[in-house]
Amino acid sequence: MALYIGLMSGTSLDGVDGVLASIPDDYNGGRLEILADAHVPFDIPFRKELMQLQGMDVNEIEREALAANTLAEKYAANVNALVAKAGLKPRDVTAVGVHGQTVRHRPELGFSRQTNNPALLAELTGIDVIADFRSRDIAAGGQGAPLVPAFHQTVFGSTSTSRAVINIGGIANISILRPDGTVTGFDTGPGNMLMDAFIQQQLRKPYDKDGRWASSGKVIERLLESMLDDPFFEKAPPKSTGRDLFHLGWLKRHLFQTDVELSTGGEDIQATLLALTARTIADAVLNYAPDTGQVYLCGGGALNGFLVQSIRRLLQAEKPGMTLDSSTVLGIDPMHVESLAFAWLAHRFTVRKPGNLPAVTGATGPRILGALYPA
């Protein structure tokens, strides 16, 4: 039995989520024990700096390096909190698996860039750090994302029924888990990303809690249809995406094309953005897993009641018997799933086993993912 820490700071840019988990050396599936969890928030100036690094700007290399150092300090604070909560010493932890903060994702050009300083994190924590999980998959011809379907299969897969697991972070992705062990998965499009960005711009709120602002508006159908016409949604898997495509500039182009003014009720635009997320998730399930009777949600979007209600309505309109639940039903809090995935990826690296699924990412074969930074 070994202890691993998984850290995740996603496209929502709200902070670092971390878990400390116990993973047997010969682990091959089933429920994992989480010993502690922690969250370290990003302050507004740091969030803005990470947001600006998503696009080309002046002095980019130096600014990214400095942001990576700050990020390593945030990661270290999370690690130290986890170790203290569990009453452990750094030497008790085998490794930290850390994703880094994605600032560019261009697999079609052969790269995906995660801001990170794993060497500094190893120095600050005294624990081995395993990072850079996407590069090897991309080098093997894959998208480098999504990486979580392999983990979803390990902890959520069933030998008796098909399941779909939807992670709704800044970007949403789906894992389709079949009883014979085959797995397919891909990014479905924006999760919370556009909704968060718009409410931050309009109301200076970090996110639309429980979808309350969206629920007060009405969907602008011509805007929704314009957004759904984006070629990404028609593209066949494997596929992945990020802020390189979906951002406020993308939304503004569609507002302009459909003659929708920003002065038009902001709640109506927010309702339309929520409808886009719900529709593209439901379409992914219905088009690629129509035989799936059980759908489970994880990530921050699983806590948005109005979004969950909207997805359920779309699914059950086509498949009345289809159930939609939180990953809590399967034994893992929806806010812990992604962090736990990176603890698992660190474990896979340590035991020298592949962490990718070529059927999901498009890589030419299974690969051991990550790079080691010893303590």
Image (cartoon, rainbow, N blue to C red):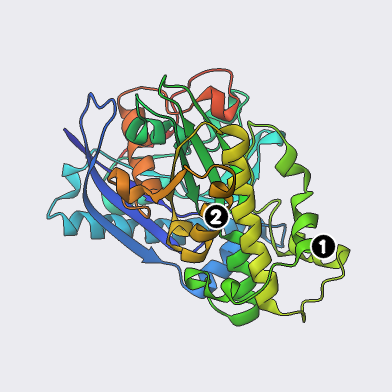
Residue 175 to residue 279: above or below: above
Q: Where the N terminus falls, by quadrant? A: top left
The residue lying at 60 percent from left, 33 percent from top is 288
94 on left or right of 218? left
Residue lying farthest to the front in this orientation: 320
Residue 227 appears left or right of 114: right
Tell me the SS state at disc 1.
helix
Q: Residue tagged by mark 1?
A: 253
Give the residue at the far left of this rendering: 87
* Residue 267 locus on image (x, y percent): 65, 76
Q: Are marks 2 and 1 in contact (CB under 8 Å)?
A: no
Q: Position of residue 342 (x, y in %)?
A: 38, 41
Q: Which residue in the structure is indicated by mark 2?
A: 313
In the rendered image, the vertical position of residue 138 relative to residue 232, given as above or below: above
Q: Is residue 7 visible?
A: yes
344 displayed left or right of 112: left
Q: Amino acid at mark 2?
A: Arg
